[in-house]
Image (cartoon, coloured by chain):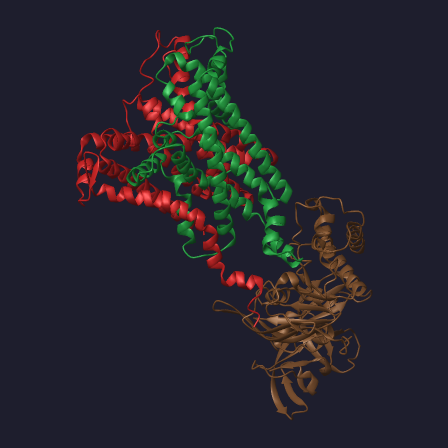
């Protein structure tokens, strides 16, 4: 029972998915200011040019601060929500979880605008801090989703067994629960970091005059001369994303292997 | 009375423990999500004068925007673009999800899923940039190919800055999003059902039509929503690929909120957008329920 | 084979009730479990047997009554300080630890030296037949090995009571039968009170000194296996344990000492008091086990009573054959089991047969 046509289609589909990403490094190393075929030669000039850009350096620094803070806060909030929702029954559970997960299905424009309206009304100045607030909001659902599946696969009798063998609820959490959900925590941190680094709309509208990476890239669209160095930057960003995702996937799989559970697929 | 046993205590106060545990996350969502959304809804019934909100409750904003032809046009365009993107992604994604679920060895499934998901996690803004600059651009891949095979003599200007280019860019961006839910629903199908279908005399095609497709419908509907909702609210693609010439709802919200500084009107547009999203979601969720009840 | 009555009580249930909201899960449990006893809680799923076990472990509080362990009321005593340890249905082997770390988990606060603890772990592993497995990863074990690790982990703490929650249900038939014998041997070796929860009546009969049969949150009968089998206290117990034929009957006289009944197809029988458990308000029936009915071949004579019948169904098992037989001219069907021996052919459906039976094998439910 072979479906060569289906397989061919799937491969073509993957090529379609990857085409722009593959073209990225091709032009990033192309020795021409104009982005066009045919290619004219190899150069690392665009990378060098990028290296000396103080504005870019600033944006990278801001992005790093935001992404690390958002990942840590969102994952912490995610641990609370995931533990509560997988282990306890409480009133309004569906409603509360729905609200927490809502940013996943709400256009980011609406999130950023409604936050902006309130921030302006309350008088909180726009800064890196307000971007972090927004990014925590949109990354928390992803953290909850990843961590819920980590907590869900924990057999409740493991906790009972530890308790039965003389541990307290607190030491049970430290000795049994935490080590078993650790891969989920690591993968949640990495995913939240990746989302935050790439995010544009919230960073653009809630950042005031602070520039982050995605906003910097957006700003460079107006200058055709800058295009090759943006491609160089993009190459590095994409490579970074892939590395982070691979690490996240590694930890997710290790978590599955550790608990001896069945692999049911991707992150979501 | 053995009232103080640990698990007994936990069970009795389970509601309290659960609420206490979820309170940090819940409070965060209430303060930074629920409160702002409520504010926007309230603003949408107020009036804006020189950037100041005047609490004069009326439906004026809604009447104004719903009756304005240019707003109607933008709403309609947003709906059309989002619907086209959704249709394209879901139709194109289904065979891939089917292939991975049914024809890939179990040990290789997560590798395939990983490969499919990676592009989604790479910077959206970079991907839009690539489409604009490299693929759809004046000297881009498409024009190069078109000239190379002799369809045109000079680069086409029109392939950028239009709704079609936007649909393509968005469809590419959200493709992995459509595959995952469909894949999950296909994975859940008991394979013996398919054998039963063929055993009962159905051809492979009819088994797909009468067993596989209905059983995977929940995933298809999830895919529809997961693609439709972010695309209808997309800001970057209309701005960059459309070059500002074909604005969508998000761009209109920005114009009213920031450029015109009319927060009340902007809020009304935002609420309208949320209403559209809600209506579409409810319609599809009802469809989903019908399919689910049909399965029982 | 009644268990020594002179042993001290290890567990005592005093009118234990348990509610989950409106649901009345345990409805007045009374009874005692003796020290050193292999005791089983047997019943269909949802009868409250696991809940009862968990009230001993301390995972479930009780709504009223008392659970005593070794003479002490356990009210307010949390699971982590009770003198009980549990083998979970899923075994609950910590997947991120080695076999040795699992077994030694409960020794964390033990004041002994590291070497002494390692020795204790090695001994516990040897006891369950896993000598030298200490360094293996826990998640790589087979079902039977996981079970042994769970046993070693619980027994290393030398509890007064070992609780086993359906420990064999996840194993295949061969492995299950093997582990049943191993568990019995292990229990004799360590001398600890074992309390086993099971829904498998055969397993309970094979392994236990005494069994409590539970239905709907109540103990229907608490007895040794033989009594349970031969003299079930209720029709429900009789039906749950093994196969029991029920023959409708009329009660002719009840003198208090003996009861005379007219059983459909079997005729008039006089039953002694020990064949008549307390009345439960069911339509009167006499119960008889399949093996107490015998097919009479050729000119064989019945030792006691004889009844004619027609074979309705033949179920061949290799060493045994089950026959479903209509009792002479009635619509009452009984099942009987015959050992297959050379020279005695398996009979066909429709054959007219004579059956031997004995009134002393009957139990009356009313």
- Percent of width and height locating residue A12: 49, 23
Q: In which quarter of the image is residue C364?
A: bottom right
Q: In this view, does C263 lie above or below C72?
A: below
The foreground one among B198 and A3 is A3
Across and down, in percent, residue B63 comes to 17, 39
Residue at x-position 56% and y-position 73%: B1
Image colour assigned to chain B: red
In percent of the image, x 43 and y 42: which residue is there? Answer: B217
Q: In this view, does C339 lie to the left or right of B193?
A: right
Q: Is residue C163 shown left or right of residue A268?
A: right
User: Left of A251 or right of it: where is B270?
Assistant: left
The chain in green: A
Of A175 and C235, the residue lying toward us: A175
Q: Where is residue B139 in the image (x, y as percent from the top left)?
A: 39, 11
Residue occupying the far right of the picture: C342
**How many labels, in total?**
0
Where does the image place residue A115, in percent across and percent down from the top left? 33, 38
Quick check: can you spot residue B213?
Answer: no
Q: Residue at 73% of width from left, 52% of height from top?
A: C104
Q: Is residue B192 above or below residue B239?
A: below
Closer to us: B47 or C141: B47
Q: Colour of chain C?
A: brown
Q: In which quarter of the image is residue B178?
A: top left
Instruction: Note whether residue A137 is visible.
Output: yes
């Amino acid at each position: 029972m072979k479906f060569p046509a289906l397989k061919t289609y799937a491969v073509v589909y993957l090529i379609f998915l990857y085409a722009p990403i593959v073209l990225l490094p091709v032009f990033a190393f192309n020795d021409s200011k104009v982005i066009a075929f045919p290619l004219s030669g190899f150069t690392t000039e665009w990378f060098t040019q990028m290296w000396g850009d103080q504005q870019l350096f600033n944006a990278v620094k801001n992005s790093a601060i935001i992404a690390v803070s958002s990942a840590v806060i969102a994952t912490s909030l995610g641990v609370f929500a995931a533990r509560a929702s997988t282990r306890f029954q409480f009133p309004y559970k569906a409603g509360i979880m729905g609200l927490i997960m809502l940013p996943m299905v709400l256009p980011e424009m609406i999130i950023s605008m409604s936050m902006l309206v309130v921030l302006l009304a309350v008088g909180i100045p726009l800064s890196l801090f307000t971007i972090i607030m927004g990014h925590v909001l949109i990354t928390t659902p992803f953290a909850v989703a990843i961590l819920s599946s980590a907590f869900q696969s924990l057999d409740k009798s493991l906790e009972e067994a530890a308790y039965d063998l003389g541990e307290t609820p607190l030491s049970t959490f430290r000795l049994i629960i935490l080590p078993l959900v650790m891969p989920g925590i690591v993968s949640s941190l990495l995913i939240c970091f990746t989302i935050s680094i790439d995010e544009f709309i919230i960073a653009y509208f809630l950042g005031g005059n602070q520039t982050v990476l995605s906003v910097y890239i957006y700003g460079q669209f107006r200058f055709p001369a800058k295009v090759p160095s943006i491609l160089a930057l993009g190459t590095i960003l994409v490579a970074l994303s892939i590395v982070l995702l691979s690490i996240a996937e590694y930890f997710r799989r290790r978590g599955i292997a550790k608990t001896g559970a069945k692999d049911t697929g991707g992150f979501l | 009375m053995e009232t103080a046993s640990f698990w007994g205590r936990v069970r009795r106060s389970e509601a309290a423990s659960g609420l206490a545990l979820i309170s940090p996350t819940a409070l965060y969502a209430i303060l930074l999500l629920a409160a702002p959304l409520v504010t926007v809804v309230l603003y949408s019934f107020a009036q804006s004068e020189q950037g100041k909100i005047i609490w004069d409750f009326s439906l004026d904003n809604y009447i104004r925007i719903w009756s304005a032809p240019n707003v109607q046009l933008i709403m309609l365009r947003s709906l059309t673009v989002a619907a086209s993107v959704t249709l394209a992604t879901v139709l194109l994604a289904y065979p891939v999800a089917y292939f991975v679920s049914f024809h890939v060895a179990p040990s290789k499934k997560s590798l395939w899923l990983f490969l499919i998901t990676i592009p989604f996690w790479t910077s959206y803004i970079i991907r839009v940039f690539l489409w604009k600059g490299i693929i759809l651009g004046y000297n881009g891949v498409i024009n190069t190919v078109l000239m190379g095979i002799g369809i045109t003599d000079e680069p086409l200007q029109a392939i950028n800055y239009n709704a079609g280019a936007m649909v393509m860019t968005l469809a590419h961006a959200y493709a992995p999003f459509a595959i995952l839910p469909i894949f999950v629903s296909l994975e859940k199908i008991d394979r013996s059902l398919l054998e039963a279908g063929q055993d009962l005399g159905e051809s492979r095609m009819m088994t797909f039509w009468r067993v596989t497709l209905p059983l995977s419908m929940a995933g298809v509907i999830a895919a529809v929503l997961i693609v439709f909702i972010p695309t209808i609210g997309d800001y970057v693609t209309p701005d960059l690929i459309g070059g500002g010439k074909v604005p969508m709802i998000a761009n209109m919200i920005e114009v009213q909120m920031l450029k015109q500084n009319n927060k009340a009107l902007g809020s009304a547009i935002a609420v309208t957008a949320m209403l559209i999203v809600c209506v579409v979601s409810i319609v599809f969720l009802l469809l989903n329920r019908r399919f689910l009840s049909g399965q029982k | 084979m009644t268990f020594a009555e002179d042993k001290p009580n290890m567990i005592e249930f005093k009118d234990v009730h348990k509610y989950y909201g409106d649901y009345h899960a345990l409805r007045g449990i009374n009874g005692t479990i003796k020290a050193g006893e292999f005791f089983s809680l047997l019943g269909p799923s949802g009868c409250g047997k696991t809940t009862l076990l968990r009230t001993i472990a301390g995972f479930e509080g009780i709504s009223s009554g008392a659970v005593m362990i070794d003479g002490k009321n356990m009210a307010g005593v949390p699971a982590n300080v009770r003198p009980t340890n549990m083998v979970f249905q899923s075994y609950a082997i910590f997947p991120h630890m080695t076999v040795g770390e699992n077994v030694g988990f409960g020794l964390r606060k033990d004041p002994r030296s590291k070497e002494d603890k390692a020795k204790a772990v090695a001994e516990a592993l040897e006891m369950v037949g896993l000598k030298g497995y200490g360094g293996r990863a826990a998640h790589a074990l087979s079902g039977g090995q996981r079970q042994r690790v769970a046993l070693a982990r619980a027994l290393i703490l030398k509890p007064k009571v070992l609780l086993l929650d359906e420990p064999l249900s996840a194993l295949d038939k061969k492995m299950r039968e093997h582990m049943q014998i191993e568990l019995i041997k292990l229990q004799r070796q360590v001398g600890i009170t074992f309390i086993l929860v099971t829904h498998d009546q055969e397993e309970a009969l094979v392994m236990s000194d005494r069994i409590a049969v539970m239905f709907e949150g109540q103990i229907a009968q608490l007895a040794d296996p033989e009594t349970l089998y031969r003299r079930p206290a209720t029709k429900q117990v009789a039906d749950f344990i093994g196969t029991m034929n029920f023959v409708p009957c009329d009660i002719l006289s009840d003198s208090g000492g003996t009861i005379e009944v007219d059983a459909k197809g079997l005729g008039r029988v006089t039953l002694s008091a020990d064949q008549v458990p307390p009345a439960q308000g069911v339509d009167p029936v006499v119960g008889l086990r399949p093996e107490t009915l015998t097919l009479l071949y050729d000119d064989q004579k019945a030792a006691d009573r004889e009844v004619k019948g027609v074979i309705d169904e033949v179920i061949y098992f290799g060493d045994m054959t089950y026959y479903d037989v209509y009792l002479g001219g009635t619509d009452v069907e009984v099942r009987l089991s015959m050992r297959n021996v050379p020279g005695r052919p398996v009979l066909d459906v429709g054959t007219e047969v004579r059956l031997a039976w004995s009134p002393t094998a009957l139990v009356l439910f009313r």
